[in-house]
Amino acid sequence: MSNNRLTRRALIAGAGAGGLGAALAAPVLAQKLIDLGLPGGPSLRPLEPAFPGKSEMIVQRIRPPLLETPMAAFREGVITPNDRFFVRWNWSMPTEINAAAHRVAIGGAVKTPVSLTLDDIASAGETVEVVAINQCAGNGRGLSEPRVTGTQWGNGAMGCARWTGVRLRDVLAKAGVAPGAARVRFSGLDVPMTDGAPQFVKSIPMDIALRDDVLVAWGMNGEPLPLLHGYPLRIVVPGWFSTYWVKMLATIEVLTGEDDSYYVAKSYRMPEAPITPEDKDFPTVPITAMPPRAFITSHADGAVVAKGKPLTLEGIAMGGDAALTKVDLVGNGLAMTCTLGPDEGPYAFRRWSVTIPQVTGDLANIGVRAANAKGAVQPEALNWNPSGYARNVIERITLRAQ
């Protein structure tokens, strides 16, 4: 997993320039729109204004930025280019970073509290590269029926990148973890936009923090992290939802007990057991690991295909928190196992393809179902919850034969 393409000097001299201010202040005058096909409410979204370093993106919100990747960007390969990678900020982000002055403070249950420069962190251990999917916990929320609150994402709040950095455990070793450590908590440079609102801080259990593949990352697809993606440093937790991938890392705190901060104890939680929209006062658990998902990317819903001819379908799939093991084409009387493409690692997208020998009529409500090495399989029915979290129902489309 070693990678020397991004040197420590590249980190310090990287993408910390400003330039977001104009985009963040831009009025919504966009004329070019895209229809996300959301069933419960307004479905059109603008594709403008353009943000620095970004190609055409679905603009869910300008300030703080929420940019969704168009599904067309997932039609080739498994790596999502930086300029098409989705963006999600909870609070206001700096539009400029002084890399030379940036420090990461490590405290809490440690032997020696420290304040580390970027060079200190980059030299803390072996340089590591991990290919992993970064996915918003609310990805696909806008497709929930009945409608739920929160950003009405389509299925484009996800992306897969090659992340470069050092292991979190090697950075923690700079301070020395004290006995009794239970969790590691992170915060970044983003700040609440309203008085009294909680700072965005997140924590992970110590056993997750000490994994080989959990990183303090400075690189994304062979380049320094773009500002929109957390320059100069972000946490990478492969297999877990992006809420834990704290951007613009500023503090690391080792805890000896449970985390009672808002975004762990009260937010980013889902029902402990299945519920209905009528249920109230149910116990909840934190959103953590991702489930398997699969998508048809070669054809959009409603596309016309040739009747009497073979049809090849293609797409991407993920295993979530374990390696993808199988993708099946299902629906419309079909039950076909798909061929999987090259494997970039257990936490990456993987291409799949399948050929229907002859199209005899419309293909109604077909989809692909993913399974992972832990035995998790995508369900037929939506596991509804009031925040639209962790969607992994089989996504279906209809193709018209002519």
Image (tube, grey):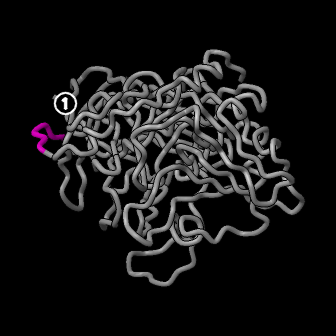
Whole-percent x, y for residue 308 in the image: 24, 23
Residue 181 appearing in the image: yes
Whole-percent x, y for residue 372 in the image: 62, 42
What range is drawn magenta here?
Answer: 29-34
> In which quarter of the view is residue 263 placed?
bottom right
Secondary structure of the residue carrying tag 1 is: strand
Does 222 appear above or below 209?
A: above
Pointer 1 residue: 304
Residue at (50% x, 30% y) in the render:
338
Viewer-proximal residue among 186 and 195: 195
Does 253 appear above or below 174?
A: below
Q: Residue furthest bottom?
A: 281
Q: Residue furthest front?
A: 101
Residue at (72% x, 21% y) in the render:
2
Residue at (73% x, 36% y) in the render:
167
Whole-percent x, y for residue 211 in the image: 76, 42
- What type is the residue that disc 1 sits on? Val
Q: Quadrant of the N terminus?
A: top right
> In which quarter of the view is residue 222 placed?
top right
Numbered-mark total: 1
